[in-house]
Image (cartoon, rainbow, N blue to C red):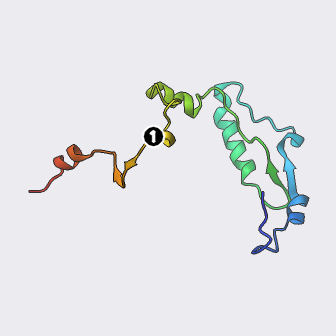
Amino acid sequence: LQPCPTYNDINTKEWYEKRIRKLEDEKWDPVVKDPKEADEKKFRAMEKANEWGDRIYVGIFYQNEHVPTYEERMLSRISNYLELPPAKQAIEADGYSLTVIDSILEKRRVV
C-alpha cells in the first residue's frame, strides 16, 4: 500500500502502519489442498480482502495449485506461446496494422 502524501493527508503512512496486518500472523491458510474446498476458501479470501478499517490485511489471500496457471492454459492452446508471447509479436509496420481482416469485412459488406 502506498499513501499519497500530496493529495491524501488522512490515509497517511502512519495511519496505514497502525492497521496493516499480515495474514500469516493470523494463522491464515490460503492454500487449497482439496479441490472441494476451493469455493469456500475463495469466498473467505474475498471476505478478508474486503475488510477495511481497523485492520487491513496483506499477504496471500488465496492459492489454488489445482488450477493450471495462465501460461499452462495458453500453452495447451498455442504451442509456441512462451517463445513468442503477444508482447513480442509485431502488430504494425510503417503505421499500418499487420492484421488482415479483409475476409471478415467482406462477409459484412452492405451492397
List x then y, in percent, for residue 56.
81, 55
Quadrant position of residue 35: top right
Quadrant position of residue 26: top right
Residue drawn 55% across the image and 27% down it: 72
Give the vertical position of 9 relative to 45 (above or below): below
Give the vertical position of 47 relative to 53 (above or below): above
Marks counted in the figure total 1
Residue under pointer 1: 89
Most distant residue in the left direction: 111
Would residue 77 appear left or right of 64 to someone viewing this image?
Answer: left
Q: Secondary structure at mark 1?
A: loop
80, 68: nearer the viewer: 80
Residue drawn 86% across the image and 50% down it: 21
Q: Quadrant of the C terminus?
A: bottom left
List x then y, in percent, for residue 43.
67, 43
Tell me the amino acid under the disc marked 1: Gln
Residue drawn 78% across the image and 57% down it: 1
59, 103: nearer the viewer: 103
Residue drawn 71% across the image and 38% down it: 62
List x then y, in percent, for residue 33.
72, 25
19, 95: nearer the viewer: 95
Quadrant position of residue 52: bottom right
List x then y, in percent, for residue 95.
36, 55
Would residue 64 appear left or right of 98 to someone viewing this image?
Answer: right
Density class for disc 1 (Cα within 10 Å; few <14, some 14-19, many ≥20) is few
Would residue 99 appear left or right of 23 to someone viewing this image?
Answer: left
